[in-house]
Image: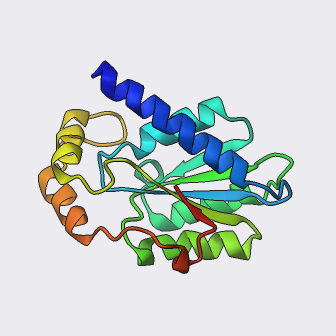
Amino acid sequence: DSELMKASNEEFKKIFQATSASQTNKHKQVVLILVGIPGCGKSTFSLRFINETSGWVRVCQDEVRTRQRTINAAIRFLEKGTDVIQGLIIDRCNFDAMQRKHWIDLAKERGAMPMCVVLRDADNVRVCTERALQRGDDGVHTGKEDWKHIVGRMGKLFDAPRLEEGLAGIY
């Protein structure tokens, strides 16, 4: 497991450096859209990122429960402007173009740069099901979710992001 964590930390550093380097226009906020089925590490990544990067925040649909509440929270953060918020992480599955479109449109409406991070195990149903089952009642999830069904269904629907969707970068 320590090898997996070491690999995750190295990937995190590479993604962080690539995302930071691509923010060439400091007057634009970045909306970083995470992509992957449940259990691939989106929340772990986003929490580590905001803890190690000043000026970044996250919204997580698992925590606020609905897409509309997630959108509302994202708008509130982006309205604070670049002096306060340089980047916003969208922590939700975003497993296909239709799911990502909400965030790409929101970024463009707000003059922000929509970017995407596809997590390493983004569509690995076996690995993600195992991880999701280990969550139990973690304060966000109840432990009663049918993860095998949920992860399997999203794995079948998974469609990797493409620049043609309107993204400024995919990592």
Residue 36 location (% of width, % of height): 36, 56
**Relative to 115, 6 lies left or right:** left
Q: Quadrant of residue 151?
A: bottom left
* 121 and 45: which is toward the camera: 121
Residue 163 location (% of width, % of height): 54, 73
Q: Is residue 10 above or below residue 19?
A: above
Q: Coloured how?
A: rainbow
* 85 and 33: which is toward the camera: 33
On-image quarter of the N terminus: top left
At 69% across and 57% down in the image, what residue appears? Answer: 30
At 47% across and 39% down in the image, what residue appears? Answer: 45
Q: Is residue 5 above or below residue 115?
A: above
Residue 5 location (% of width, % of height): 37, 26
At 67% across and 69% down in the image, what residue appears? Answer: 107
Q: Quadrant of residue 115?
A: bottom right
Q: Is residue 72 above or below residue 136?
A: below
At 86% across and 48% down in the image, what residue appears? Answer: 83
Residue 91 location (% of width, % of height): 48, 52
